[in-house]
Image: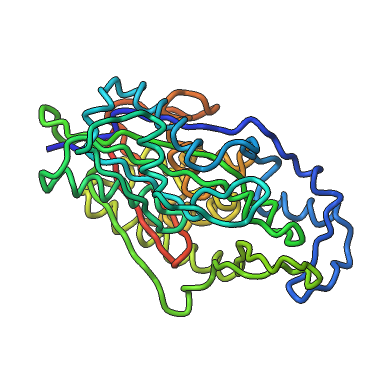
Amino acid sequence: MSICITGSGSYIPEIIKKNQDFLSNTFLNSDGSIFKVSNELIIEKFNSITGIEERRYAKNEYNASDLASFAAKNAIKDSKIDQETLDYIIVAHNFGDVKFGTKQSDSLPSLANRVKYKLEIKNPDCVCYDLIFGCPGWLEGVIQAQAFIKAGMAKKCLVIGADTVSRTCDINDRDSMIYSDGAGATIIEEKSKISNTGILSHKSCSFSSEETFYLFFGESFNSKEESKNNYIKMHGHKIYEFALTNVPLALKSCLEDSGKSINDVKKVFLHQANEKMDEAIVSRFYKLFDLTPPNYVMPMSIRKLGNSSVATIPTLYDLVNKNKLKNHNIKKGDIILFGSVGAGMNVNAITYQV
């Protein structure tokens, strides 16, 4: 049995927010004090570390479930399946639907049920549920879809990653420049007539001791804010060190479980969290085999799309799969790796043969 991605789709929002658009922000330290350097220098340093030049925001009238349904339509069209034959719709997200101008998360009903409604799927045997696993959520959804298919519970699954992270940011926190909105989707199917392709191995880990709250919801750095809303916050340096230690090991374990060689790997698709961090992860991964990464082994979209949480990897895969990213393509037979890290702290990986 081969369990494969038979269709992919993404939705990249139209609103572009450039780095210079943050020049008028008042950035504060976590104790509420004002930075002693100019916004120009803050943004310049931010760009040198993250690689981000611009990011995408959803239109005011769209929520995460809308973005998810747009990406889903594209994936269904790409796969050429009848959407009424879907057994599961799995939507990975972290914040539910956050309406523009509010800070309240809405996930009742689930985003997966909302997507089914928006797609006008009538089959009651198409089961919907949401998955919260931090930024690795889409990848974990693919792993769960594979398990359902192996168990005989499903033949076709729609797995989506979607978030509007821009609506959960503290405008006084310079980390707000990292986040963006988007959605990516894939159709996961059993292909009984094809062997030795699709998902070859997977790895999932949850490190939930002192790492649990490296990413969390907290109050604004601006103590004068009256709303007392909570916003996405993170201990960036701790996350960086955690990722550099644990993601390469997960990738190595996953690859070894597949029986494939490091020399077989054509692409490594990582969660688009931070350009320098991703480059360091890949370097450390190859160093575990006493190698250096080949040129163009790691596609990146973060410079133009920012960090859209669960949407980064399926969006990146869709772009490469459809030859929309310069210097990157995949072809039948290629061995590729997926790897992610996020709130929890959760880490996962998949070895996949195209």
| Residue at x-position 61% and y-position 44% | 306
Left or right relative to 141: residue 328: right
Q: Choose between 274 and 252: the one closer to the eye.
A: 274
Residue 117 x/y as whole percent: 38, 35
| Residue at x-position 27% and y-position 36% | 188
Left or right relative to 273: residue 310: left
Q: Is residue 209 above or below residue 71?
A: below
Q: Quadrant of residue 348?
A: bottom left
Name the residue at the bottom extreme. Answer: 210
Q: Choose between 182 and 194: the one closer to the eye.
A: 182
Q: Quadrant of residue 5?
A: top left
Quadrant, the C terminus: top left
Q: Choose between 186 and 62: the one closer to the eye.
A: 62
Colouring of the image: rainbow
| Residue at x-position 11% and y-position 48% | 151
| Residue at x-position 43% and y-position 44% | 161
Q: Is residue 11 above or below residue 254?
A: above
Quadrant, the N terminus: top left
Q: How many marks?
A: 0
Left or right relative to 235: residue 71: left
Q: Is residue 69 above or below residue 251?
A: above
Residue 173 x/y as whole percent: 73, 62
Residue 101 x/y as whole percent: 68, 49
Q: Quadrant of residue 191?
A: top left
Residue 270 x/y as whole percent: 46, 48
